[in-house]
């Protein structure tokens, strides 16, 4: 849909269509409200920065982290011993610049605020595009805010509880030489954590994206099945970009759930195509 066609469909007044400037003004207020929500959440994170840093940010670096303990216990129960247990590792971080921690605290507050306020931010975006949809399209997109938010938080939790502990343990235990001491900067760790939480959360929107493309006729279940191998390569590339490291272990951890989401997208697309074919038959009958 072209930009001007989209604005023309957003008829929100009973007497006539809003002008292009009116639409931009409305969009501006949606953005302002979304930014305010992020700032409020960011201020809350900043006020609680001591707790957030000590309990949440550094949580995945500790051997008693909940997912590390759970994986170890799961490995023992299924009979593979300590194969899934993380070996003990001492993690320390340093800062080589005087302003490093100060800047990192604002970065942490903003990213944390964005994650907390994500459902509201998307809701504001949805409120802007909703008037352009037909009643039939609105019916098909019922619950979209819930599903977008659910998939986003699933991705964030997966990156935080699964990928980050594996990443930290792997690199702190990897020794090229005993003379090399690993002591990354706090900013480096924070940047990696952002990639493995916020980035994975966005990638988890794949089923909804495929659902949207199927509804508007760009892709189909048959198309997705035909190019399954190509999709795997694209997913692998996306995982390599979003993953802070390029080791096969981390890539595998990210690629597997993303590919499973792609397979789920095929199932969703098949159901949508079946429903579309049924509706077409009813129209022709």
Image (tube, helix red, strand yellow):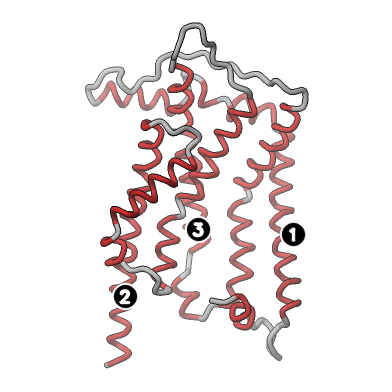
Q: Nearer the viewer, residue 236 or 72?
A: 236
Query: Relative to residue 109, is residue 150 drawn left or right?
Result: left
Q: Which residue is mark 2?
A: 275
Mark 1–mark 2 CB contact (< 8 Å) = no
Secondary element at tag 1 = helix
Q: Position of residue 47 (x, y in %)?
A: 74, 34
Q: Which residue is mark 3?
A: 146
Q: Residue furthest left?
A: 79
Secondary element at tag 3 = helix
The residues bearing labels 2 and 3 have C-alpha atoms spaced at a distance of 22 Å
Q: Residue at x 43, y 17 (%)?
A: 174
How crowded is the residue under tag 1: few (<14 C-alpha within 10 Å), some, or many (20+)?
Answer: few
The residues bearing labels 1 and 2 have C-alpha atoms spaced at a distance of 39 Å
How crowded is the residue under tag 2: few (<14 C-alpha within 10 Å), some, or many (20+)?
Answer: few
The residues bearing labels 3 and 1 have C-alpha atoms spaced at a distance of 22 Å
Q: Position of residue 207 (x, y in %)?
A: 40, 57
| First in sequence: mark 3 vs mark 1 | 1
């Amino acid at each position: 849909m072209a930009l001007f066609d989209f604005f023309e469909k957003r008829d929100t007044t009973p007497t006539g269509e809003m002008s292009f400037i009116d639409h931009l003004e409305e969009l501006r207020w949606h953005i302002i409200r979304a930014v305010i929500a992020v700032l409020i959440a960011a201020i809350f994170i900043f006020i609680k920065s001591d707790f957030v840093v000590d309990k949440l940010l550094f949580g995945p670096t500790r051997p008693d982290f909940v997912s590390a303990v759970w994986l170890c216990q799961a490995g023992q129960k299924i009979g593979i011993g300590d194969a899934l247990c993380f070996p003990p590792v001492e993690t320390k971080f340093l800062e080589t610049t005087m302003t490093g921690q100060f800047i990192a605290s604002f970065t942490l507050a903003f990213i944390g605020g964005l994650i907390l306020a994500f459902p509201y931010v998307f809701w504001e975006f949805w409120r802007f595009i909703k008037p352009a949809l037909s009643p039939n399209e609105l019916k098909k997109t019922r619950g979209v805010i819930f599903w977008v938010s659910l998939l986003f938080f699933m991705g964030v939790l997966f990156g935080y509880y699964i990928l980050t502990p594996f990443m930290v343990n792997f690199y702190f235990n990897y020794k090229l030489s005993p003379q090399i001491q690993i002591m990354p900067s706090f900013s480096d760790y924070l940047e990696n954590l952002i990639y493995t939480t916020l980035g994975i959360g966005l990638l988890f929107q794949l089923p909804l994206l495929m659902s949207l493309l199927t509804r508007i006729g760009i892709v189909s279940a048959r198309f997705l099945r035909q190019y399954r191998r190509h999709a795997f390569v694209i997913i692998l590339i996306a995982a390599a970009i979003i993953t802070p490291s390029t080791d096969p272990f981390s890539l595998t951890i990210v690629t597997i759930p993303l590919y499973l989401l792609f397979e789920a997208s095929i199932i969703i697309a098949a159901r949508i195509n079946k429903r579309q074919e049924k509706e077409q038959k009813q129209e022709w009958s």
